[in-house]
Image (cartoon, rainbow, N blue to C red):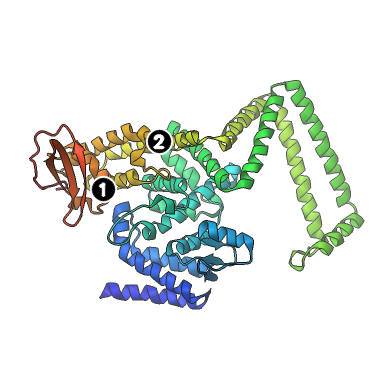
Amino acid sequence: MLDKIRKMDRNEALEMVLEQKDIDEKTKNLLQGILYKIEVSYSDYKKAKVINKTEKQYIDEIIGNINKKCNKIITISFNDKIENSEIMEQLEKNKFYVDEKQIITYPIEEKLLYAIEKSINKKKIVSGKYGIFANTISNFIITGKNIDRVEVLRDFNGWSWTTIKQEIENIKANLVYQTLQILFGEEFMQNWTLDTDGIIGYFEILKTKISEKYGEDISEKFEKILEKISILNETKFDYNFKKENIKKLNELQEKIKLMNIVPEYVTAQTEEKKKIEKEIAEQQKFLNSEKLVLEEYNKMNKKAELQNKIISINAIKKKIRLEILELLNKIEEINNGLMPNNFMQLKEQISKDKYLYETIYYTKDEEDDLYIEFEKIFLQCFERQIKDAKSEDLIKLIYKFRYFNLLPFDELRAIKEINELEEKTTEIKKELLKQAKKLKIISNNVPFEVWTHIFETRIIELNQLYYKIFNEYDKKYVQIFDEKISEEKFLINNIEKNKLNKKIKIFI
């Protein structure tokens, strides 16, 4: 009864928020449907992923997001047409459209929830000191977060757990976000995605955690691969980004070529400095002339719309002073770069940047290799957590590793189907089996040939699993099942001692 009252309170809380918004009846019904489906599915979702967040916390966050950001939501039918071609194109492509003022969606609950998350999570979460990567890593992680929030609707229905890869908006962003969440926990990832402008610096904290637990070398590899895959992701989904960075890469290549011939480089930089000094002189002359400043003020205000008009002449002067300061900084950079020690450091940094920017030309195979390398680093880190785990922690690691194995790697394959990871995942399964037997979590009689298949089952409660070995056409098979569901059978070898046709519980 108490649970029913709590659920009713959440529905009422949603109704109260929606009353203050420009939201049509179709959308209200969809949102109520989202709450109902979460109530049905959340228990299985929470168990399968081994997360701490309660159903109430999750639903309260959704209602809070609608309250904070979503002032106007429109649900349209699949046959409706919108005059704005940009909106129509996005609707046909994504099944929703989001801008600063509104959300427009087709009547699909998962897409509506994704659009709400996307509208609330438009921010940079990595410090600007990382330059281009501040945006690419931020976009990558935030996209993964948005997808993570929809998973309970998309993959769970209260009876089964099914992942349809084609319904995931960005498989690679989901893969990386879930991998990081397994390694660092949901609370850390949640806090990171709330760190506007990277003020707290969770990316730095993440690197420090890896360095302290797993070594400086792994931390550096982890950072470089994350930078590269974030560039890959941005290149795929933002044509302008790719275009701009092809230009940037060409500039870096030309600069390296020039730096290889030192006298020519010094001459080119000296000429660049002269151009900047001339520009500063012109800006200073402009700033010292009240007449020129007034003319610029009138000219800019004449063209600008009312909301963009400049309030005072001092605003013009401030803008010019900032431009002069930027130009002075460029001269300082050139002077520093021409000093012998700094010259070699600059050349090395430009070579590193060029190496990273070349990611935009990666082939599909090169892209796969990069993500496989990322997951190999994760597996190294995950393996180290097993040996020190106590009983309760080890059970959580078993669940997490099952979830990891079932994660989609691309449109066709899950992690468990990636051959390059098989050797390491097998080692981890063996270590989990060894520790589980040592801590008396499972029976000593459970053979590895049976154990390995629990990381392929989608039966939610692993501690309710049984197995049975049987003969069929002179071959041995194992079937894993609980009291309600029987999984498919698996062909097995090297099992001599186990009794046939006997139902045996896996977890004690």
Above or below 488: residue 1: below
- Could you tell which of marks 1 and 2 lies nearer the N-terminus? 2
Looking at the rendered image, the disc whose residue lies closer to the viewer, 1 or 2, is: 1
| Amino acid type, label 2 | Ile
> Residue 219: where, in percent of width, then height?
45, 36
Q: What secondary structure is found at the residue carrying circle 2?
A: helix
Contact, CB < 8 Å: mark 1 with mark 2?
Answer: no
The amino acid type, in three-letter code, at marker 1 is Thr
Drawn side of residue 210 relative to residue 196, left or right: left
Element under disc 1: loop
Check disc 1 and report the residue beneath it.
457
Is residue 439 something that shows in the picture? Answer: no
Q: Residue at (43%, 70%) from the top-left corner?
A: 30
Mark 1, residues whose alpha carbon is within 10 Å: few (<14), some, or many (≥20)? many
Residue 88, by quadrant, is bottom right
Residue labelled with disc 2: 377
- In this rendered view, identify the residue nearer to me: 352 or 161: 161
Residue closest to the eye, 299 or 219: 299
Instruction: Answer left or right for 340 relative to 40.
Output: right
CA–CA distance between discs 1 and 2?
A: 25 Å
Image quadrant containing the N terminus: bottom left
